[in-house]
Image: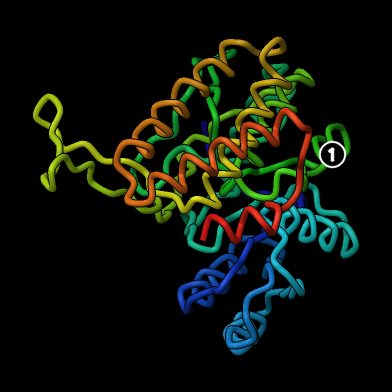
Amino acid sequence: MSVEPRSSRSVVAIVASYRPDADLVTTAAKLTQQLDHVIVVDDGSPAEFSGRLDEIEATGVTVIRRPQNAGIAASLNAGIQAADENGRPDFVVTFDQDSVPVDDYAERALATYDDARAAGRRVGFVVASSYSGHAVHTRGDVAGFTVAFDPMQSGFVIPRETLESIGRFDEGLVIDGVDSEYTARARAAGLDVLVGAGCDIRHQLGRRDPARLFGRPLRVLGRELSYNYHSPQRVYYIARNGTTLTRHYLRKDPSWVLRRLGEETKAHLLRLAFSPNRRAIAVAMIAGYRDSFRGRTGVIPATLARRLR
């Protein structure tokens, strides 16, 4: 695979922001050097971050300041809408604010896209190959191209025809599962979700806490056991949206759903066993499962959020 220039095709970056730090100023400026335009969508950060957003805007980036926090899906959709109103780019690429892609990320992704299209594949979008050196989980290959399993949205390179075919991100999910749902929706439409060769991103991988038993780190087969800690409110979204995905896609793509469900179950069990606020975690999980079966979407109910604090 050779990396060719993007030629006349336009690529716009959509960066989701909340309480941005100084690193985003640097990242935004770097993105303007490799992409046609950059849009940072701030999701209701407090007023004290206004100066930081001004700094980002001064780099030539468009900054959209949303009045209140509505979640990652709403932020990305707002960015896509702004991009459409300012020239309808051929591709959009989505990033989290703490993601720093390789300098030729877009060229590498489009090379994978072009090669797959030339091989007769219908490509939904191209995703990152690794995050801070950790390779993304894959699902075999098709026609010699690596298929992503359940990729994070940071690094999605989405062609216009995909947006026109399957739509934008599901804002009812708010945060967790937004990328998984988009992946499942693309595949249900017969589109490939492919790993971009060499599409590496430096990314903060989130908080991992050691599993402790009687105050001591727990080791299994010589390795220290750890788990991804999330707040009870975040666990609510994980449980609710994960259950909704299982219900909607089990028949359409059982192997993907069951593999994803297995990994999610292990993560939940570790949280229930080792999180310092296990009782609140359990309450959040039960509420999430219940609300999924009730068809509830959107932001966590205010009464539940207060209970979980």
Callout 1 crowding tier (Cα within 10 Å): few <14, some 14–19, many ≥20: some
Percent of width and height locating residue 118: 70, 23
User: Image point 31% across, 36% down: which residue?
Assistant: 273
Q: Quadrant of residue 271?
A: top left
Location of mark 1 (residue): 167
Is residue 255 positioned above or below 181 on the image?
above
Q: Nearer the viewer, residue 127 or 266?
A: 266
Compared across the picture, whether 9 is left or right of 279 comes to right
User: Image point 78% across, 54% down: which residue?
Assistant: 77
Percent of width and height locating residue 299: 72, 53
Q: Nearer the viewer, residue 289 or 148?
A: 289
Compared across the picture, whether 292 is left or right of 24 comes to right
Question: In the rendered image, is residue 113 in sight?
Answer: no
Percent of width and height locating residue 159: 76, 40
Is residue 117 positioned above or below 21 on the image?
above
User: Image point 61% across, 39% down: which residue?
Assistant: 287
Amino acid type shown at disc 1: Gly
Is residue 286 positioned above or below 27 on the image?
above
User: Image point 74% across, 47% down: which residue?
Assistant: 91
Percent of width and height locating residue 285: 54, 38
Question: In the rendered image, is residue 73 in sight?
Answer: yes
Compared across the picture, whether 238 is left or right of 11 comes to left
Q: Nearer the viewer, residue 249 or 272?
A: 272
